[in-house]
Image: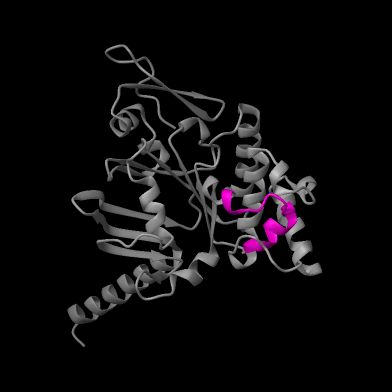
Amino acid sequence: MPERALTRRRDGAASRRMKTTRMRDEVLRVDGLRVQRGETTVLSGVDWSVRRGEHWVILGANGCGKTSLLKVLLGYLTPSEGSIRVLGREYGAYDWRELRCHVGLVSSALQASVPDHEPALDTVVSGRTAQLDLWAEPTPAEARQARRHLRRAGALHLAGRPWGVLSQGERQRVLIARALMARPRLLILDEPCAGMDPVAREAFLGRMETIAREPRGPRLVLVTHHVEEITPAFSHALLLRRGGVVAAGPRGRTLTAERLGETFGARLALRKRGGRLELRVSRGARAAGAGVSI
């Protein structure tokens, strides 16, 4: 075989191996995503991927498309254009209802579906089959597993308490344990700190930081519009504005005052304190610290 042809074959084989490795490392991938509803473009030209070892935050103002993106990923909203792969499965070629059992979701929207009388332990067990309002008595094995995940979420002491008496922060911890019950590879946190007081919020974020650093824990995707909620474990950020991507990548390149100012449509000052970010709207022509990034 001629040397040139042999080189091309080797290069092609190497390229295929690299592509296979990249796909194996990807937890999710979105290419050219567009969501159109009537005359309104909800999302347009969204390219995004999450790989093993990465934890992402999705940032943007209200109405930027964060919730719509989550609905597409979970199969509750049909894209108008583009391709989506979650955990190696391509949208349209796989039963998304089954896939949801492997993707954990912590969202305040779930809280209204949990009966007030249901003990926290039963709520956690219901995550094993991605259902709400558990109707069967947990088996001893399920109860042991649920207690283990309640402990991971810092909520073991809540196991016997009814849902109706739990605080907002306690409920979110129970929902984390519920999401972990299915051993997800991907855990989505949809504005999990909404409605929490500052003390409860810090306790919750501390627990999420612990889970994020577990060697075999799930990849985390945090959806928020508060940079103060981004703990050090989150390595990457996706910034959205009016349905499009402002920036996506490592936090050192994305979480800057300039990028965040473009995202929120305002001149912002950014400050780092204790490994966390603080953001304020600047009234000056150029705020001190405007070039700070993390």
Q: Quadrant of residue 134?
A: bottom right
Tell me residue 231's x, y (percent).
54, 37
Nearer to the camera, 132 or 73: 132
Nearer to the camera, 167 or 116: 116
Q: Quadrant of residue 270?
A: top left
Q: Residue furthest top?
A: 284
> Left or right: 168 with respect to 118?
left
Nearer to the camera, 15 or 162: 162
Q: Which residues are magenta?
A: 112-127
Q: Quadrant of the C terminus?
A: top left
Above/below status of 176 relative to 267:
below
Residue shown at the point (39%, 34%) measured from the top left: 255
Above/below status of 27 relative to 66:
below
Q: Quadrant of the N terminus?
A: bottom left
Tell me residue 53's x, y (percent).
51, 54
> Left or right: 22 with respect to 277?
left
Tell me residue 190's x, y (percent).
49, 46
Residue shown at the point (27%, 73%) measured from the top left: 11
Nearer to the camera, 160 or 15: 160
- Magenta span contains residue 64: no
> Left or right: 224 with respect to 150?
left
Magenta-colored segment: predominant secondary structure: helix
Residue shown at the point (38%, 71%) measured from the top left: 20
- Magenta span contains residue 120: yes
- Please say which color scheme the image uses: one colour
Tell me residue 251's x, y (percent).
42, 39
